[in-house]
Amino acid sequence: MFKTLTRHGNSLALVIERPILELLGAGIDTPFEVTTDGNALILTPVRDAARAERFRASLEKVGKKYAGTFEELAK
């Protein structure tokens, strides 16, 4: 399968179709760990509840810390 990026505001997004999400057991609220080996982008659904909570807490902390920056980037 080949995919192209889609413009989403000032960013780019990769749309993941429902059959793939169903295969992964992922939905709109599923956090994903994003890693790379330098050549490939690796998306892994986070299944561990404690890990997911740490992820959400980190995401919230970064959101608060850089809220002004994100607002400027969105303009």
Image (spheres, rainbow, N blue to C red):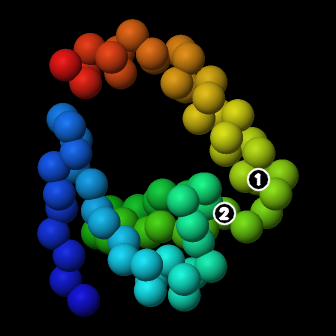
Residue found 36% across the figure and 66% down from its top: 41
Labels 2 and 1: the sequence-earlier one? 2
User: In which quadrant is the C terminus drawn?
Assistant: top left
Mark 2–mark 1 Cα distance, whole angstroms, equals 7 Å
Q: Is residue 53 left or right of residue 22?
A: right
Q: Is residue 68 left or right of residue 72?
A: right
Q: Give the number of the disc on residue 46.
A: 2
Q: Are marks 2 and 1 in contact (CB under 8 Å)?
A: yes
Residue nearest the viewer, comparing 64 with 19: 19
- Of all residues, the one furthest to the top in this rendering is 68
Residue 18 position in % (x across, y down): 43, 78
- Amino acid type at image mark 2: Val
Residue 63 position in % (x across, y down): 52, 24
Residue found 19% across the figure and 83% down from its top: 2
Residue 47 position in % (x across, y down): 73, 67
Residue found 33% across the figure and 17% down from its top: 71
